[in-house]
DNA sequence: ATCAGTGCAAATGGTTTGCAGCATC
DNA sequence: GATGCTGCAAACCATTTGCACTGAT
């Protein structure tokens, strides 16, 4: 199921929100870049680059909030960077962010199953896999890292 | 093994750092509140409340950096709040933050072992368990949660 | 007496908010 | 034509930085 800008606009409309040019543009960017994880500022930049008329950052944030309230998109926190947004139907992987080089790796939901089940069993907690990334060291960086595990905290 | 302020001060000294009143105070707070996860501002507030002489927030941040470089403390990112600091020897749990009520639950590193091994095997990624919290819904909130269609992946 | 460490104030980055005017409904 | 949405500017919070001064070594 391919979500496009029209679907997002329809989601807004169904919430009795007015359809304005800035909102339409934000919807277009999100739909066009589906599959990516875009920050509010990135969305703002793309909107700007696509036309000469100016829309405000604040409006982008407000529109993202509206889309999130409408259930169309969700946000994730990946590493130390800004909040990123993605379509709600693209929510099934855990991000791992390398604390040294900043690269991210995604682990599919299927691989996480046993882990999530174990956590739910032990704590009753239902993890929302893609809301927060996990930190650590990627293969390359952990190979290069000093063997001393107690001081493996790097960067930032 | 109980780490106290003297140990932390000694750690700083062993890095050829000068021992100043502000640094000593920060060490005292961290040692006194061991087991807690304190933000820089919380540490600052506690230091302030414990005496009339003023120390600067920037100094707290710089001291925390120094202690982290010395390997004495580490920081974690728990939910949407500010960075929190804790003694390095208290670093073996994964925090789960409830996105609804804000409560946090900790899962011991030992329980996660098999899973982390699996991730390392599949992706080469070595997860630093306590650096980032995971989000989700705690038992109470997921029991109480409406079947919100937009977040249907939460409770899987 | 050196120079690391300090307080201060200003800058940063990401995000939010108050407000007056504009445009969608 | 009401009022929801906008741009603007300013505020925000956590954090960082430049700088001249102070104090640990």
Image (cartoon, coloured by chain):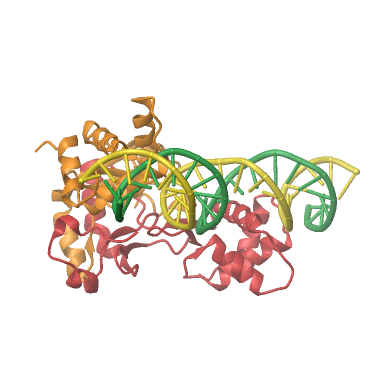
Chain colours: A red, B orange, C green, D yellow
Residue B121 or B28: which is nearer the viewer?
B28
Task: Kindly identify the residue that appears in the image at 65 percent across and 53 percent down.
Answer: A14
Percent from the top left, x then y, of residue D4?
A: 72, 47
Whether residue B99 is visible here, answered yes or no, is: no
Q: Is residue B124 visible?
A: yes
Q: Residue at x 67, y 59 (%)?
A: A56
Residue B126, how many percent across, how many down? 21, 63
**Vertical side of B108 occupied by B43: above or below:** above
Residue C16 in which image quadrant: top right
Work out which quarter of the rendered image holds the C terminus of chain A and state it: bottom left
Residue drawn at x 17%, y 72% is A143
Observer-nearest of A111 and D23: D23
Left or right: residue A139 versus residue A7 is: left
Q: Position of residue B96 (x, y in %)?
A: 30, 45
Q: Nearer the viewer, residue A36 or B83?
A: B83
Q: Nearer the viewer, residue A29 or B74?
A: B74
Left or right: A105 as drawn, with respect to A60: left
Task: Determine the residue positioned at 44% across, 64% down.
Answer: A90
Rendered view: B62 above or below B128 = above
């Amino acid at each position: 199921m391919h979500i496009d800008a029209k679907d997002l606009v329809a989601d807004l409309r169904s919430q009795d929100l007015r359809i304005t040019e800035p909102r339409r543009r934000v919807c277009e960017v999100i739909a066009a870049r589906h599959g990516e994880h875009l920050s509010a500022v990135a969305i703002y930049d793309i909107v700007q680059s696509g036309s000469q008329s100016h829309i405000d950052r604040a409006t982008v944030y407000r529109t993202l909030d509206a889309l999130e309230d409408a259930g169309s998109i969700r946000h994730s926190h990946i590493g130390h960077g800004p909040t990123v947004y993605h379509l709600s139907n693209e929510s099934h992987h855990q991000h791992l962010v390398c604390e040294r080089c900043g690269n991210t790796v995604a682990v599919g939901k299927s691989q996480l199953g046993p882990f999530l089940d174990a956590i739910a069993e032990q704590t009753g907690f239902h993890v929302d896999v893609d809301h927060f990334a996990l930190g650590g060291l990627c293969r390359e960086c952990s190979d290069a890292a000093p063997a001393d595990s107690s001081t493996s905290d790097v960067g930032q």
